[in-house]
Image (cartoon, coloured by chain):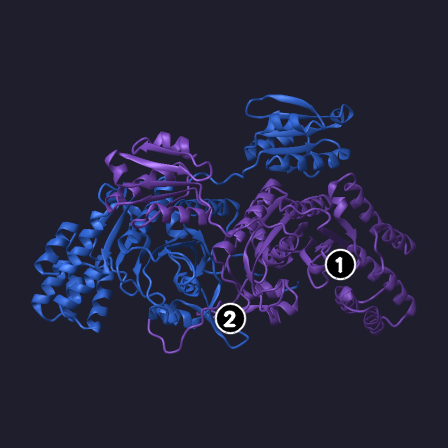
Chain colours: A blue, B purple
Amino acid sequence: MATTSPLSKNPYRGTRDFFPKDKRLQNYLFSVMKKTAESFAYEPYDGPLLEEVDLYKAKSGEELINEQIYSFVDRGERNVAIRPEMTPTLARMVAQVHREISKPIRWYSIPNLMRYEKPQRGRLREHWQFNCDIFGAPTHLGEIEILNVASSLLKNFGANETHFEILLNDRRVVDGLFKKILQFDETTSYKLYKIIDKAKKVSSEALDKMVSEIILDPHKKSTFMEYLQLNSFNGLFTLLEKNKLQDELTIMKEFLSKLENSEIMKVIVYDPTIVRGLDYYTGLVFEIFDKHPDNRRALCGGGAYANLLQIFKEDPITGMGFGLGDVTLTDFLTTHKLLPDFTKIDLNVIVSYQTDDAYNLAMNLSSRLRQFGLKVETLLGINNFKKVFTMAEKKDVTFVVFIGEDEIKSNQVQIKNLKTKEQKNISINDFEMMKGFLC
Amino acid sequence: MATTSPLSKNPYRGTRDFFPKDKRLQNYLFSVMKKTAESFAYEPYDGPLLEEVDLYKAKSGEELINEQIYSFVDRGERNVAIRPEMTPTLARMVAQVHREISKPIRWYSIPNLMRYEKPQRGRLREHWQFNCDIFGAPTHLGEIEILNVASSLLKNFGANETHFEILLNDRRVVDGLFKKILQFDETTSYKLYKIIDKAKKVSSEALDKMVSEIILDPHKKSTFMEYLQLNSFNGLFTLLEKNKLQDELTIMKEFLSKLENSEIMKVIVYDPTIVRGLDYYTGLVFEIFDKHPDNRRALCGGGAYANLLQIFKEDPITGMGFGLGDVTLTDFLTTHKLLPDFTKIDLNVIVSYQTDDAYNLAMNLSSRLRQFGLKVETLLGINNFKKVFTMAEKKDVTFVVFIGEDEIKSNQVQIKNLKTKEQKNISINDFEMMKGFLC
């Protein structure tokens, strides 16, 4: 156990220690995620912490593999990585079973993930991510359900349309525009996707300059800029009509018709800059944004994909899903004051004793109370009344049990309800009466 | 997304994919762990997946660091490891806060851990481990509470004294015997601890041979062998008395006196071969064993330690804790048929529609039912009655909702309870009546 230099007490850079108040908060986030997913009939799954690097190479963008992944060679010469995201694992698992199980497949998970990032607000190296995906659903209906799950999640935390909005686009629309109208090749499209991803983060001059470097034809550039300035579904429809993108128009109109009279339309906004360009999406794409000016950032991103199983040489299957991280979610809920207080332990009863002989009695009594479903702290060692009251108050506990010399003599315990000030002496073996008083 | 060779669909060696039935089972294990820990006033904590290797070097045995740890150098030249156990992280966290928070500190966690092991029954490379620890409690009382938590956990899974036993010893007793009576030096003691750890796994001849190689003095060897053959507290007391180990005798007698009349004495057995020799324990040590002949193995191990914070140059603090892994626990519960069935989804209602127009209605209705706390699957696409019934039966769902052309005309939905065969037509906006029927 000896060591020469003092060890650091801090967690590894970009990771967190969860002390009880932090972990209770996280457990609350997880419980609302679980409840929401299961209310939509999503089933839980999980996968390994490590995957072979080939899986990520096959699926992910280069940036992730080269710079952001925690990878190493194991003792068996396997090139492995700590999962930076859940989707490749999900694809691998769905590839194993999709032929045998009935569709749609609705799955959710809350894995811990690691990315080698520069730690900053909203971004840490280790985070937990809620993942919800549906496979094999009719395209628009699966897309809408996923939007509903994401939106319901935030509502189940107490958020509403004043707090967040869903910015939405469709990769088929952007691809149609790029390929059919602007006739860009793949390289140009790829570069423009990167520019679109940055569009909101740079000045209009900088944006113009970046675009001018890629699109030399002024007419094409003007169409592209016109696209980038869209801010409504109606604007999009006009652009699609003008450019005779009939298939794309049909897709978007059908999608919207399915949302008529739905609650979720209140939070959906068309946004041409949402493309999630370096990812594997092939249909609807969306991000949920915090509307608060102090925390104007994406909470959640997702979309539809058709080719996720291709890396396993499996037939295409429609898929749609999203991921939402615990760090950005906590920032969102904190910003809008939607988090309960987690500083205090959730405890029902403190069992105390005032004489050494009473320890065994206190221990056995506590066991019985736990069988009633109560959360019971048995004080270890003798504590006088005053000290017990102070502790109970600090912990916000309703009931305290005292076992002193007098109680032992009379074969009773004294139980006090600190909220109502009611107090009872109950025979040491009358667990039914105790239950009645305590539960 | 293109790849030249087909990717493996299997998880990384020694890890598991958790499909929904597996994950539901694991969630059940976790929920009983959480419930048990909180019923004893233990608070949740968690730490990072990665720690600096120095932390493990300072704390753990050599074997773990050299052969079993997943370690690598990160992009910032830090030597880091995926946590193989939780205790070093726990020590680091307690070292941060122990001066400011009231004692005893009662904490639990259920982290995923990785060790580079040869996968075999009960041992995988990735597992989850329930960890419970108490710091700053009066020695025996903390020890007994930890034994109670571990035992209650198994009881809360439905196990009883016919299924498991707690094999128990005290490092102070073994150390007293080694140092005061047998006068072994540290090297000899260390070797003998290793032999004791193996004592039950080898033949008596092999054991005799191993001991003879270390202890040359026949009198000392005979005392050591006499110790190894103990099988009761009374036998231990006799040995301690004979060798005038008065302090050790007092410790053990006081410990036992605190357990008088307690339920837990039914499952406690004295076992001289339990020493957990290569670890950091300084007091009580124990392992919980499955009593079933087909699964005769340790489920859980733990003990008392006084020097856990020493690596951080902090003052000693009494500590006691245990770890219990999900793999061995599942084997135990499976062996004794204590696991519920997790093959089916937990679902309350299926909402179906029989005409395309009804999709929006079905979606909105489902949202309302979810607000009642119901788990609702909205079928995506038109399904006839027969198909809906088949699905409901397969998923063991009680309620199905039908919205067909007739229903839309009459502004009603039809709800059927498949268990009671009761059926109701309810106005499409009468959510209170729906709630009454469904909840």
User: Disc 2 is attached to a residue of which chain?
Assistant: B
The amino acid pointed to by label 1 is Ile
Residue B148 spot, x, y in % from top left:
69, 45
Q: Quadrant of the N terminus of chain B?
A: bottom left
Whether residue A147 sits left or right of residue A347 in the image: it is left
Judged by depth in the image, the label closer to the viewer, 2 or 1, is: 1
Q: Residue at label 1?
A: B274
B182 with respect to A434 (left or right): right
Number of numbered discs on residues: 2
Q: In the rendered image, which quarter is residue A157 located in?
A: top left
Of residue B395 and residue A391, the one placed in the foreground of this image is B395
Residue B221's x, y, as percent? 88, 67
Residue at 29% over, 32% down: B429
Badge 1 marks a residue whose secondary structure is loop
Percent of width and height locating residue B240: 87, 54
Of residues B336 and B5, the one nearer the viewer is: B336
Residue of label 2: B72
Examine the rendered structure and indicate whether residue B216 appears above or below residue A364. Answer: below
In this picture, residue A292 sits left or right of residue A101: left
The image quarter containing residue A204 is bottom left
